[in-house]
Image (cartoon, grey):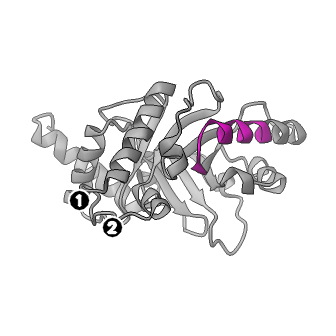
């Protein structure tokens, strides 16, 4: 997952663990599905339900991750973990160690579980002076969420996120710069209410200008809109046929 300013990378798709699986065309349009177990009523062997797309599970913060959590992750065949509320390199290193132990106990290949970190979503990570470079070969990308940072910092968030408090501007910069420094991708979370092509195109343009590699969709509908916006953009540039 190298940094790509032109956003040619496929997006990620966040879904509640209890949500039905998307259609095949949506699965083929994303780089990975990220399941959020928050509020799920039951355990699902998610990875076994999807064979064509990588699957990640969102858990954290790191001090709340238990041995039982990681045992379930490895047993399910999940490809990686989205670490929430990552504050800096020590959180990455701690999760790396926990995963090494879990892989050894469970008989999984060492380093088989990747890490993507939600970064610059807490004041600690925005202010951290510490590089993420070389912290773990598992670390493949950073994910920035303006609503998460706004909630953590107690600041206002503009409705469409194109205008934002200085805290959000600093968070976006921190996420992109740390990702660039570490040589990994940076993903930008689409607003949950970006529900038409114009809104998606506007936000993607802003995200690309800020140096993000790709975006994170919060619904299958947003993935479809991303495809439509991308096609419309190519046609307007004279590349469509």
Residue 101 within the segment the image draws in magenta: no
**Residue positioned 30% across, 44% down in the render:** 207
Q: Name the residue under label 1.
A: 199
- Dividing the picture into quadrants, the one containing residue 165 is bottom left
**Residue positioned 57% across, 31% down in the render:** 132
Q: Which residues make up the magenta segment?
A: 84-99
**Residue positioned 11% across, 37% down in the render:** 237
Residue 42 at what x, y percent from top left?
A: 71, 72
Residue 92 within the segment the image draws in magenta: yes
Vertical relation: 206 (above or below) 131: below
Q: How many marks?
A: 2
Tell me the number on the disc at residue 193.
Answer: 2
Vertical relation: 109 (above or below) 231: above
For label 1, the SS is: helix
- Dividing the picture into quadrants, the one containing residue 117 is top right
Locate the C terminus and report the quarter of the image it occupies.
top left
Does the residue at mark 1 contact the one at mark 2 (Cβ under 8 Å)?
A: yes
């Amino acid at each position: 997952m190298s940094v790509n300013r032109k956003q040619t990378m496929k997006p990620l798709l966040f879904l509640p663990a209890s949500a039905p699986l998307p259609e095949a065309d949506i699965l083929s349009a994303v780089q990975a599905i990220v399941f959020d177990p928050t509020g799920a009523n039951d355990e699902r062997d998610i990875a076994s339900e999807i064979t064509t797309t990588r699957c990640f599970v969102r858990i954290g913060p790191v001090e709340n991750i238990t041995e039982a959590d990681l045992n379930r992750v490895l047993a399910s065949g999940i490809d990686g973990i989205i670490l929430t509320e990552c504050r800096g390199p020590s959180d990455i290193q701690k999760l790396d160690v926990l995963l090494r132990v879990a892989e050894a106990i469970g008989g999984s290949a060492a380093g088989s579980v990747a890490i993507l970190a939600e970064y610059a979503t807490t004041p600690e990570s925005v202010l951290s002076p510490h590089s993420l470079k070389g912290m773990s070969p598992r670390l493949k990308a950073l994910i920035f969420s303006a609503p998460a940072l706004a909630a953590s910092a107690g600041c206002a968030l503009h409705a469409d996120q194109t205008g934002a408090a200085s805290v959000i501007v600093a968070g976006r910069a921190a996420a992109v710069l740390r990702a660039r420094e570490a040589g990994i991708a940076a993903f930008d979370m689409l607003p949950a209410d970006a529900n038409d092509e114009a809104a998606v195109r506007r936000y993607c343009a802003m995200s690309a200008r800020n140096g993000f590699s790709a975006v994170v969709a919060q619904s299958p509908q947003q993935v479809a809109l991303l495809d439509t916006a991308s096609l419309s953009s190519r046609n307007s540039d004279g590349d469509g046929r």
